[in-house]
Amino acid sequence: MTSQLLLPPNPFTRPVSAKVFLTDDDLTLKRKSNQATRVSNGFSLRAKAALRSNHSSSVEIPNQWYNLTADLSVKPPPPLHPKTLEPIKPEDLSHLFPNELIKQEATLERFIDIPEEVLEIYKLWRPTPLISKELEKLLQTPARIYFKYEGGSPAGSHKPNTAVPQAYYNAKEGVKNVVTETGAGQWGSSLAFASSLFGLDCEVWQVANSYHQKPYRRLMMQTWGAKVHPSPSDLTEAGRKILESDPSSPGSLGIAISEAVEYCLGSVLNHVLLHQTVIGEECIKQMEDFGETPDVIIGCTGGGSNFAGLSFPFIREKLKGNISPVIRAVEPSACPSLTKGVYAYDFGDTAGLTPLMKMHTLGHDFIPDPIHAGGLRYHGMAPLISHVYEQGFMEAISIPQIECFQGAIQFARAEGIIPAPEPTHAIAATIREALRCKETGEAKVILMAMCGHGHFDLSSYDKYLKGELVDLSFSEDKIRESLSKVPHVV
């Protein structure tokens, strides 16, 4: 179903009737008098963050991360050593991650305490707002639409939720230099930001297509002190091999991971998804304060960290029988790992340097077409999300990028926020659901993950507005060839 483009005739003259998440009288008065943006220099960074976030005084930053694995009756398959095919041992990961992150990767504890140092930095942008405003009016739907907005962080996305603790644990264990990959650059800029706080050197391999498409993300990383390389590059053996076979390769997250051999990861791994659950824990309390229970929860998925961060605490409540929402992942049609991939052990990178992970995959050497949602161009899905999908706790769909940008324009003109290309997939799926409610008359409560703003992705909007954006898909032959190289693990 393709969403219908509906735009207000003059969005600047419509009366504002916002259900923005505000309860503090003084803060409400400042917003009404349009003074909240004129904060004096005497306010602390924390106070400024509170004013920007527009959050309820009754909702606090969670002091623990939530581990969904603890509540699953069927545990996810373990990662395997690529040579022995035996389950990975902690010592096998010691050259990649600090000890605390290795523990978090395999823990069966339900909750993990967030260090005070991390909480203090979180206060720069957390709690983040839960907003219900104009989109449902624009669509003339009986559905009630809420979105959890993570774009107020210094890097403009949800990624600092895990970048800060990763930098903290590395610094605590004496690491001086961190290396990573990034697609659109939201993860790379987040780790560069976090590294600058803890005095770490940061080196980033950015997918070549995004490196050239999104120069301001690269400049953000460099401003925070990071070294940034386009990937594939001639600086690593993995990069040189790719360039030999395809000198014009647009790159992929799998290739960039191969080049960042000693790395921090911004998605996919269990400890990353764990850190992101601050999103869902806040949101549960915010929805309660609104007196609402979500009927449908929607988020975009590439590696899956933002989707997991919002949905996993709600899945916990679903397992308890407290709620029963439909939980829907949305991926790009050009890289549909959940909807078109196979559930199998595969490498997390293109060169085959990582452990084997049981996940939905298109094959580790699958290189997606260069869609503008660079953060969703990954051949696989987080193993824990893949497992949850296999267990039937969620569903998945894929949407082409033109429909996503069409939805993004509607969202921007209704809500005032220009979304990054990645969450436009969640927006498009939300609009589909809201229009179905318009047809059926159902007053569903739709909760959407809005993981970041698109201020550094305006070149993609330029192409859309000029009519130059095209839908990119995939070749069935290309996927078959890629899947034929997935390791055979019995």
Image (cartoon, grey):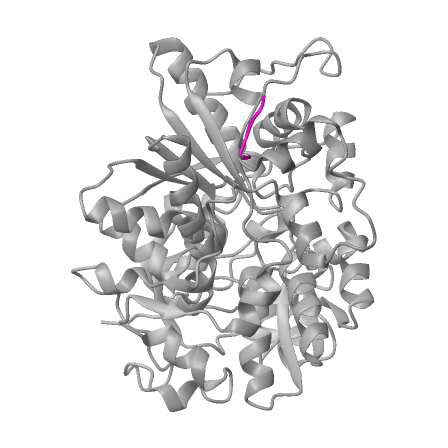
Residue 316 position within the rendered picture, expressed as x and y whole percent measured from the top left: 27, 51
Q: Residue at x 78, y 45 (%)?
A: 39
In the rendered image, the vertical position of residue 370 relative to residue 440, given as above or below: below
Q: Main secondary structure of the magenta part?
A: loop
Q: Residue at x 37, y 80 (%)?
A: 103
In the rendered image, the vertical position of residue 369 relative to residue 404, given as above or below: below
Residue 50 position within the rendered picture, expressed as x and y whole percent measured from the top left: 63, 48
Foreground of the two, 188 or 163: 163
Which quarter of the rendering shows the N terminus? top left
Q: Which residues are magenta?
A: 18-22
In the rendered image, the vertical position of residue 218 relative to residue 456, given as above or below: below
Which image quadrant is residue 419 in?
top right
Q: Residue at x 46, y 69 (%)?
A: 114
Q: Residue at x 41, y 80 (%)?
A: 102
Which quarter of the rendering shows the C terminus? bottom left
The number of numbered discs placed on residues in the rendered structure image is 0
